[in-house]
Each structure stands twice: as structure tokens, then as C-alpha cells.
């Protein structure tokens, strides 16, 4: 479902779709050390898939109540990273980026760690 958030300024209207907000959230989360990538969980088999750059927003769910935004981020963490610290930094960064770029209030950022991946360097 495509939701549009509309803000009226003295210069006119600004409209943002959930896709725009999800992109901001996905890029912000991807910048955090320890995040291997975004993931999407397939309902059919429950396997977490690591998403490429072109599918980043499929790992983010956005809902809103007026100007209040609620975000769910699904991600894969790098093996050896402190999951609680990674999740906390993702929450802070996602909230900050969305609020700074859109002016919307982020009420909650829920982080779902869908899996852990071992970096190629450790596999060898």
C-alpha cells in the first residue's frame, strides 16, 4: 500500500511516499558497522534473504499515524558483531536520518535481526 505524507509549507506542498522513507531507513541502517545487509523474510519458507542495493527497501516496513512514523528494519548482522550494539546504533541512525531529512517524528524503530553471516575472510 502506498501511503503519502503531505506537508504544507509557505512555498507549497511536499509529498513523501513510504518508499522514500524506507529508502532513507535502509541506507542509514546499511551505514552501521556490523550490518551485513538488509533482509526480507519469505513467508513460504522462512528463509532470510540478503538483499542487494536495488532491493534495500524490501527489508523495511513503514507505518504512520499522522506525522508520527513507525519503522521496522529487517537485517543480517556480521558474525562477531555485538548484536545489541548494532541494533541500538541502527535505531539511532534510522531515527536521526528520517527526522533530519523529512521533518517527520519517528516514534519507534524496531530492529529484527533475521540472521548472521560469516564474512568471506573468515570462511577461508
Image (spheres, grey):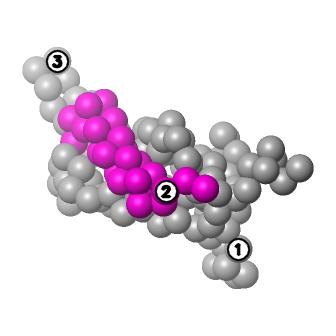
CA gap, disc 1 and disc 2: 22 Å
Q: Is residue 7 visible?
A: yes
Q: Which residue is mark 2?
A: 82
For the N terminus, the quadrant is bottom left
User: Can you tell which mark lies on residue 47?
Assistant: 1
- Judging by the rendered image, the residue that carries numbered circle 3 is 11
Q: Position of residue 59 (x, y in %)?
A: 55, 57
Could you tell me how far apart the alpha carbons at marks 3 and 2 are, in whole angstroms?
46 Å
Residue sitting at the far top = 11
Q: Is residue 91 magenta?
A: yes
* Contact flag, marks 1 and 2 (Cβ < 8 Å): no
Q: Nearer the viewer, residue 11 or 117?
A: 117
In this view, the residue in front, 91 or 84, is 84
Q: Position of residue 24 (x, y in %)?
A: 43, 38
Ranked by sequence position, the earlier of labels 3 and 1 is 3
Dot 1 or dot 2, earlier in sequence: 1
Q: Nearer the viewer, mark 1 or mark 2?
A: 2
Q: Range of the magenta residues?
A: 80-104
Q: Is residue 71 left or right of residue 52?
A: left
Q: Residues within 10 Å of mark 3 (few under 14, many from 20)?
A: few
- Residue at x 61% of width, y 56% of height: 80
Q: Position of residue 63 (x, y in %)?
A: 33, 60
Is there a contact, CB below 8 Å, between mark 3 and mark 1?
Answer: no
Residue in view at x 73 percent, y 56 percent: 118
Amino acid at each position: 500500500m502506498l501511503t503519502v505524507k503531505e506537508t504544507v509549507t509557505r512555498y507549497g506542498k511536499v509529498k513523501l511516499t513510504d518508499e522514500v522513507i524506507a529508502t532513507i531507513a535502509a541506507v542509514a541502517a546499511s551505514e552501521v558497522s556490523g550490518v551485513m545487509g538488509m533482509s526480507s523474510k519469505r513467508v513460504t519458507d522462512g528463509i532470510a534473504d540478503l538483499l542487494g542495493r536495488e532491493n534495500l527497501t524490501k527489508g523495511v516496513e513503514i507505518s504512520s499515524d499522522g506525522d508520527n512514523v513507525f519503522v521496522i528494519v529487517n537485517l543480517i548482522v556480521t558474525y562477531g558483531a555485538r548484536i545489541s550494539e548494532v541494533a541500538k546504533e541502527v535505531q539511532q541512525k534510522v531515527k536521526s536520518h528520517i527526522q533530519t531529512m523529512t521533518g517527520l517524528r519517528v516514534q519507534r524503530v524496531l530492529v529484527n535481526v533475521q540472521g548472521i553471516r560469516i564474512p568471506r575472510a573468515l570462511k577461508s
